Image (cartoon, helix red, strand yellow):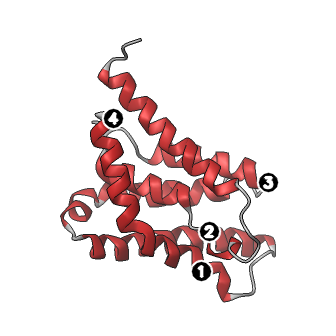
Amino acid sequence: MNLSPSMRGRLMLLATFAVALILMVVPGPPWAEPFRPDWVGLVLIYWCVAVPQRVGVGTGWTLGLVLDVMYGSLLGSHALAKSVIAYIAVRLHLQLRMFPLWQQAVSVLVLLVVNQLLVLWVRGVMGRAPETFVYWTPSIVGMVIWPWLFVILRDVRRRGNVT
């Protein structure tokens, strides 16, 4: 079965988001749970920078709603955070593309911290804010793995002809 390049690109996008969602819920060793990066946020940022005409705020909102349902959190808390980082990434995609990988990683750290601040704000309003520094480790881990994830997703984009 031959797929059109457009359909193949859509399937590649969906597949990467599906893998990111799966990585968010697959259990790991208890000691490693605090260090699990925000896979959905990282993949969303990559696609917003790489193909902003196809992935944007609507995609971020949808992925955030899926995360809210998966985690059983207040409906819209992750959706708000993901749509805001998608907006910022799309808005700054030309600048982010020009940065070397280490500067992109720092920019990704800022975007992931914004994401976590928005979720923390909603949790705080509800009276369920975390008490430890461990809450911030996924952003730091996301920054560290960004260069490798960028290279992997760039290869997926090129092989899948995602434009």
Q: Marks 2/3: CA distance? A: 18 Å
Q: In this rendered view, identify the residue nearer to me: 95 or 134.
A: 134
Marks 4 and 1, the one that precedes in the sequence: 1
Q: In this rendered view, identify the residue nearer to me: 47 or 19.
A: 19
Q: Marks 1/2: CA distance? A: 11 Å
Q: For the residue marked with disc 3, what is the amino acid?
A: Gly
Q: Residue at x 62, y 68 (%)?
A: 36
Marks 3 and 4, the one that precedes in the sequence: 3
Residue tagged 2 = 36
Is 7 situated left or right of 82 in this image? left
The x and y percentages for residue 133 are 65, 88
Q: Are marks 4 and 1 in contact (CB under 8 Å)?
A: no
Q: For the residue marked with disc 2, what is the amino acid?
A: Arg
The x and y percentages for residue 104 are 31, 70
Q: Residue at x 61, y 49 (%)?
A: 21
Q: Marks 2/4: CA distance? A: 27 Å
Q: Marks 3/1: CA distance? A: 20 Å
Residue tagged 3 = 72
Q: Residue at x 42, y 35 (%)?
A: 12
Marks 1 and 2, the one that precedes in the sequence: 2
Q: For the residue marked with disc 4, what is the amino acid?
A: Gly
Q: Is residue 52 among the parts visible in the rendering?
A: no
Q: Marks 4/1: CA distance? A: 33 Å
Residue tagged 1 = 136
Mark number for residue 160? 4
Is 150 situated left or right of 83 in this image? left
The x and y percentages for residue 159 are 30, 37
Q: For the residue marked with disc 1, what is the amino acid?
A: Trp
Q: Quadrant of residue 11?
A: top left
